């Protein structure tokens, strides 16, 4: 396997098991990641070992060009987030393929991680490419059929995915837009609301300033910062962005994982 030095505090398990990616499998002390390519990764505390992809791919996928240590220091604003960061030190935000992230998070609505993974695996078996390591994720040029998606367990989401006919240029164009405009453009696609759009922007486009607000985050923020007083989703989203600033999305990911694991 090839290896590359990780320049910040890093935990492979916390990163991959935090709900930002779905098609992963634990293998020995590492993971197999299923995307447009399939590769294995292992982290020894200093170096990230990998196969089947080149250095540039790993650099971008694991955001190794981002100074996460500096970012983490900037979001340690109170005891709640400090407790979450200490419990899950080394959690970073991946940089995933925009198209795959879009399909994945459309599937995430009213769903759980196990079922999302099953749906994405099934659709990859039908529309992806078979390799020695498994099936790759379908390319952006694929025309999904509702009947097939139904058999893959997509339910009401089949209409959204089958209508997702945008080509690579559409997803590339998002890079050039400011975050507010990019979010509006994504929300013009069927099946994408505010939270899903924010997840796409955070996990594919490095828009760390978004604050992905679902029922989990809403409850967490109400409990920690509003003395359990009920707030609207919009209020929670705006609070997160205002309070944590340009790295609100990273703070949100720590709070989300810490709450799911019962740490806060």
Image (cartoon, grey):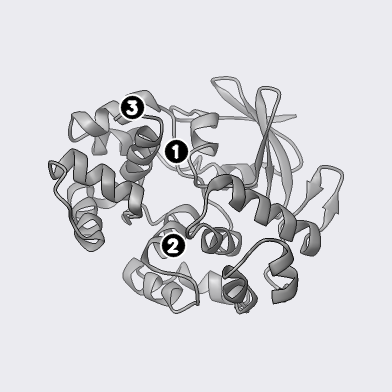
Q: Earlier in the sequence, mark 1 or mark 2?
A: 1
Residue 159 percent location from the top left of the image: 60, 76
Residue 127 percent location from the top left of the image: 78, 64
65 or 259: nearer the viewer? 259
Give the residue displayed 33% in from the left and 27% down from the top. Answer: 263
Q: Which residue is mark 3?
A: 263
145 or 103: nearer the viewer? 145
206 over 16 or under it: above or below: below
Q: Which residue is mark 2?
A: 196
Residue 85 percent location from the top left of the image: 33, 29
Density class for disc 1 (Cα within 10 Å; few <14, some 14-19, many ≥20) is many
Dot 1 and dot 2 residues touching (CB under 8 Å) = no
15 or 53: nearer the viewer? 15
Could you tell whether 182 is left or right of 19 in the image?
A: left
Density class for disc 3 (Cα within 10 Å; few <14, some 14-19, many ≥20) is few
Secondary structure, mark 3, is loop
Q: What is the spatial separation of the Cα atoms under label 1 and label 3, in whole angstroms?
A: 18 Å
103 or 207: nearer the viewer? 103
201 over 50 or under it: above or below: below
Q: Which residue is mark 1?
A: 92
Counting the numbered discs, the total is 3
């Amino acid at each position: 396997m090839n290896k590359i030095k990780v320049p910040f505090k890093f935990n492979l398990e916390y990163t991959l098991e935090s709900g930002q990616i779905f098609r992963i499998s634990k293998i020995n002390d590492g993971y197999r990641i299923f995307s447009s390519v399939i590769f294995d990764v292992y982290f020894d505390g200093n170096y990230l070992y990998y196969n089947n992809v080149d250095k540039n791919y790993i650099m971008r996928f694991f955001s190794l060009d981002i100074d996460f240590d500096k970012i983490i220091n900037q979001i340690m604003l109170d005891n709640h987030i400090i407790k979450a960061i200490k419990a899950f030190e080394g959690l970073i935000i991946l940089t995933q393929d925009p198209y795959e992230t879009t399909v994945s998070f459309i599937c995430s609505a009213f769903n759980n991680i196990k079922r999302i993974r099953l749906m994405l695996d099934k659709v990859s078996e039908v529309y992806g490419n078979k390799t020695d390591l498994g099936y790759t994720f379908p390319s952006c040029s694929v025309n999904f059929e509702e009947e097939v998606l139904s058999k893959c367990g997509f339910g009401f989401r089949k209409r959204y995915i089958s209508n997702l006919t945008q080509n690579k240029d559409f997803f590339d164009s998002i890079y050039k837009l400011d975050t507010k405009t990019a979010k509006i453009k994504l929300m013009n696609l069927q099946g994408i609301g505010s939270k899903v759009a924010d997840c796409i922007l955070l996990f594919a486009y490095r828009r760390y300033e978004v604050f992905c607000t679902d029922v989990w985050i809403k409850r967490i923020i109400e409990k920690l910062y509003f003395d359990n007083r009920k707030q609207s989703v919009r209020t929670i989203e705006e609070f997160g962005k205002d309070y944590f600033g340009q790295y609100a999305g990273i703070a949100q990911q720590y709070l989300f994982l810490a709450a799911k694991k019962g740490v806060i």
